[in-house]
Image (cartoon, rainbow, N blue to C red):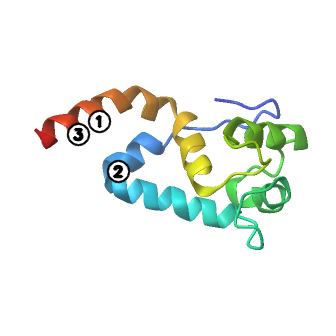
Amino acid sequence: MASRSGIVFEDFFPAMVDKLGAEGFMKELCNGFQLLVDEGKGLITFESLRRNSKLLGLQDMADDELRCMLREGDLDGDGALNEMEFCTLMCRLSPGLMMDSRKWLAEAIASEM
């Protein structure tokens, strides 16, 4: 997947889930949230995303692309991402995770029965 600035994103999330398991993967997503968060607000804001974008290799993304990322995940309309919104967005943006999600749901249901 490529952004308008030409940055190509490779979807490593399915391999991470296979290696770490679902719980370990979610811990890693939460760690990613902590890297990007505005510590004073406890949220990922445009400013904190812009400031920390180098950590993700996104330093060349335009401001409007970063704002679009925030809008895409901002479920409560406050203009920022809380941890749940961030994790949800990351999973939604992973084509591999979305394709495998039905399989994992079926396996979880089967293991409960």
Give the camera-side residue of 63 and 15: 63
Task: Please tell me which residue is depicted at 63% across the width and 38% down the height of the picture.
Answer: 9
Helix, strand or loop at mark 3? helix
The N terminus sits in image quarter: top right
Q: Is residue 63 above or below residue 57?
A: above
Asked whether, in this view, residue 112 is left or right of residue 88, the answer is: left
**Mark earlier in primary sequence (2, 1):** 2
Task: Please tell me which residue is depicted at 56% across the width and 51% down the height of the picture.
Answer: 84
Helix, strand or loop at mark 2? helix
The residues tagged by marks 2 and 3 sit, at their Cα atoms, a distance apart of 11 Å
Q: Which mark, by number, is residue 104?
A: 1
Q: Amino acid at mark 2?
A: Ala
Q: Quadrant of residue 83?
A: bottom right
Q: Residues within 10 Å of mark 2 (few under 14, many from 20)?
A: some
- Report x, y in % for residue 108: 23, 39
- Kindly give the residue lying farthest to the right in the view shown: 63
Residue tagged 3: 108
Viewer-nearest of discs 1 and 3: 3
- Report x, y in % for residue 11: 52, 38
Residue tagged 2: 22
**Mark earlier in primary sequence (2, 3):** 2
The C terminus sits in image quarter: top left
- Report x, y in % for residue 88: 55, 43
Q: Residues within 10 Å of mark 1 (few under 14, many from 20)?
A: few
- Report x, y in % for residue 30: 53, 60
Asked whether, in this view, residue 47 is left or right of residue 22, the answer is: right
Picture mark count? 3
Give the camera-side residue of 18 and 49: 49
Q: Are marks 1 and 3 in contact (CB under 8 Å)?
A: yes
Helix, strand or loop at mark 1? helix
Q: Are marks 2 and 1 in contact (CB under 8 Å)?
A: yes
